[in-house]
């Protein structure tokens, strides 16, 4: 029986409670004030008047949370249903990023010439924001008809999320101990065998670090992509609710996006640790 | 007829202007079935010598032949046991050996290959650890896997690069006897690299000291005139063992301790400027650093007659 460390459970809960409390204190509240002429008006009072507090957020958005998979209308669906749409597109874009990024990283790591040729370009493309790639994606796939939006979104996610995979794989390949390569040479392994039996296993921990960072970026990009393309998903929901002036939904989206991102990162880091423990 | 021959082999590293010569004109010949130990200082170039035989390095001058063939690169006719085991950490004991067997005997049937793997795991007494990964094994066990991997390739010659260097003294003693026994039973030609004269004498038929680098050479060959079965405890009292050890150590400390005579180095002259002690030192700032010629930006020359 594993001993439960109460500190590890209790302290985060205390932290969450304190944050909620602070949030409630600074947020605004609606007060009904009677005027001199007998009529009443609603006013927002508080430090940050337009910020909805946690209680208000819960009351206003509970229909999205209590029935997370409900579909009432196209733009009125449960929060996890929206999240699911986003996750599907992220998964596709992320898969493209890995399929392209991993071999690219191997090439960069294996060949000094290739690395000298393309490293500067990668370093320049890497910091470009998804907001800058998106319009290019839209233009590139403008003729794709119905799937134009989807292709533009995939392009943006893939092109933004690829770089950590590329760079970490390259570092991992360069870090393969000479001893392992000597073994491959002494055993006269063929090139393919050296790649699959020595180099890829030896690079796996680095690759997974790259994969984890890439997944984080892919999830980060999705909101921007959905805002711009109007694809249904959590980012799109957030944007619509902003246009409708429903600030409580924005808060709900932020919290959901954060929780999903956190869970994805945790899951990947579990995988990553598994591979690291072997080496 | 010698099986392994090194003829005037030299090897150096580094760029031409700062070249460090490791081996200079090394000659060695080993007969088939002979166990030869090369004993020398750490960093003298023993591993370099072994890598020249394994084919991982190429000599700058001279040549290495095995069975009359000049060695051009690595090959499966030479089994190498590396200093740091070099087992692949993501594979189990059996898989590590299997990788070697698969590579050397691609035409064998599946059954025959797994039999070969199991036979050599059994030979080094690791059947119980067959499915463990290297990280779950002790240093001594890892080295036994490494020996099994080399032997399972059925090489013509076994190259042991300080196989017991990273082990504690007690494990080392047991493993010396075990590896010695396995090598003799296999009847293979063995080149053993070690920094311990006792280990060399215990395991080999012939022992060659290597001088300190740079530009290391091999010393005279000392045949080990003890029987093939050697008991470590009895050996410590054996006068022949003592005499041989004394001879080897005497060569290593005497003629072998001198590094090669010609060492080329770039000369650098001191460029300190003399300080004029008549100039009073500033109160704040304290001692001046010694001024160097190379730091001078300007030079004032007094031209008044």
Image (cartoon, rainbow, N blue to C red):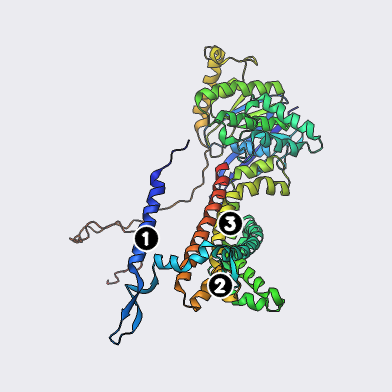
In the figure, residue B3 lies in which quadrant?
top right
Local crowd at mark 2 within 10 Å, few (<14), some, or many (≥20)? many
Instruction: Residue at 50% x, 74% y: name it.
Output: A241
Label drawn at residue B39: none
Q: Earlier in the sequence, mark 2 or mark 3?
A: 3
Q: In terms of depth relative to the viewer, which is nearer, A190 or B28? A: A190
Q: Chain of mark 1?
A: A
Residue A60 at x, y = what percent?
A: 46, 69
SS for callout 1:
helix
Dots 2 and 3 on the same chain: yes
SS for callout 2:
helix
Residue A239 at x, y = what percent?
A: 52, 74
Q: Earlier in the sequence, mark 2 or mark 1?
A: 1
In the figure, residue A26 lies in which quadrant?
bottom left
Quickly name the residue at label 2.
Answer: A236
Local crowd at mark 1 within 10 Å, few (<14), some, or many (≥20)? few
Quickly name the residue at label 3.
Answer: A211
Quickly name the residue at label 1.
Answer: A19
Q: Earlier in the sequence, mark 1 or mark 3?
A: 1
C-alpha span from label 1 to label 3: 31 Å
């Amino acid at each position: 029986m594993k001993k439960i460390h109460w500190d590890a459970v209790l302290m985060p809960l205390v932290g969450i409670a304190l944050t909620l409390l602070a949030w409630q204190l600074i947020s605004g509240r609606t007060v009904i004030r009677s005027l001199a002429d007998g009529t009443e008006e609603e006013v927002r009072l508080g430090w940050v008047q337009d910020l909805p507090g946690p209680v208000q957020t819960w009351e206003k958005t509970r229909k999205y949370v209590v029935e997370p998979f409900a579909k009432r209308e196209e733009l009125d669906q449960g929060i996890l249903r929206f999240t699911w749409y986003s996750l599907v597109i992220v998964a596709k874009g992320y898969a493209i990023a890995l399929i392209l990024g991993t071999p690219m990283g191997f090439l960069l790591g294996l060949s000094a010439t290739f690395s000298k040729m393309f490293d500067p370009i990668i370093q320049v493309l890497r910091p470009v924001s998804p907001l800058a790639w998106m319009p290019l994606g839209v233009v590139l796939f403008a003729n794709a008809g119905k799937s134009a939006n989807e292709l533009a979104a995939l392009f943006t996610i893939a092109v933004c999320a690829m770089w950590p995979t590329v760079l970490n794989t390259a570092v991992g390949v360069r870090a393969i101990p000479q001893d392992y390569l000597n073994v491959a040479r002494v055993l006269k392994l063929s090139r393919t065998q050296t790649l699959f039996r020595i180099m890829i296993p030896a690079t796996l921990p680095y690759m997974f670090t790259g994969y984890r960072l890439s997944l984080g970026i892919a999830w980060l990009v999705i909101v921007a992509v959905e805002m711009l393309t109007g694809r249904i998903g959590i980012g799109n929901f957030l944007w619509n609710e902003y246009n409708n002036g429903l600030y409580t939904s924005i808060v709900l989206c932020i919290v959901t996006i954060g929780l999903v991102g956190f869970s994805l990162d945790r899951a990947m880091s579990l995988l990553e640790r598994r591979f690291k423990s072997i080496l | 007829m010698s099986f392994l021959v090194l003829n005037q082999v030299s090897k150096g590293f580094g760029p031409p202007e700062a070249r460090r010569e490791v081996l200079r004109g090394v000659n060695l010949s080993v007969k088939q079935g002979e166990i030869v130990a090369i004993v020398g200082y750490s960093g003298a170039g023993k591993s370099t010598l072994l890598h020249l035989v394994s084919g991982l390095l190429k000599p700058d001058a001279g040549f290495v032949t095995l069975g009359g063939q000049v060695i051009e690169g690595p090959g499966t006719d030479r089994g190498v046991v590396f200093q740091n085991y070099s087992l692949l950490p993501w594979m189990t004991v059996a898989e590590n050996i299997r990788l070697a067997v698969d590579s050397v005997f691609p035409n064998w049937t599946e059954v025959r290959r797994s039999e070969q793997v199991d036979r050599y795991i059994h030979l080094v007494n690791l059947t119980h650890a067959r499915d463990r990964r290297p990280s779950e094994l002790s240093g001594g066990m890892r080295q036994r896997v490494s020996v099994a991997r080399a032997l399972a390739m059925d090489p013509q010659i076994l190259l042991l690069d300080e196989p017991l260097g990273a082990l504690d003294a007690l494990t080392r003693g047991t493993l010396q006897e075990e590896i010695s026994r396995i090598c003799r039973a296999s009847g293979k030609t063995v080149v053993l690299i070690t920094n311990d004269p006792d280990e060399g004498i215990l395991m080999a038929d012939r022992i060659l000291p290597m001088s300190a680098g740079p530009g290391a050479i091999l010393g005279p060959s000392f045949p080990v005139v003890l029987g093939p079965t050697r008991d470590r405890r009895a050996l410590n009292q054996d006068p022949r063992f003592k005499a041989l050890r004394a001879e080897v150590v005497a060569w290593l400390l005497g003629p072998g301790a001198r590094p090669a005579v010609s060492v080329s180095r770039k000369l650098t002259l001191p460029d300190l400027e003399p300080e004029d002690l008549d100039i009073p030192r500033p109160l704040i700032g304290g001692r001046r650093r010694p001024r160097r010629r190379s730091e001078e930006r300007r030079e004032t020359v007094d031209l008044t007659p």
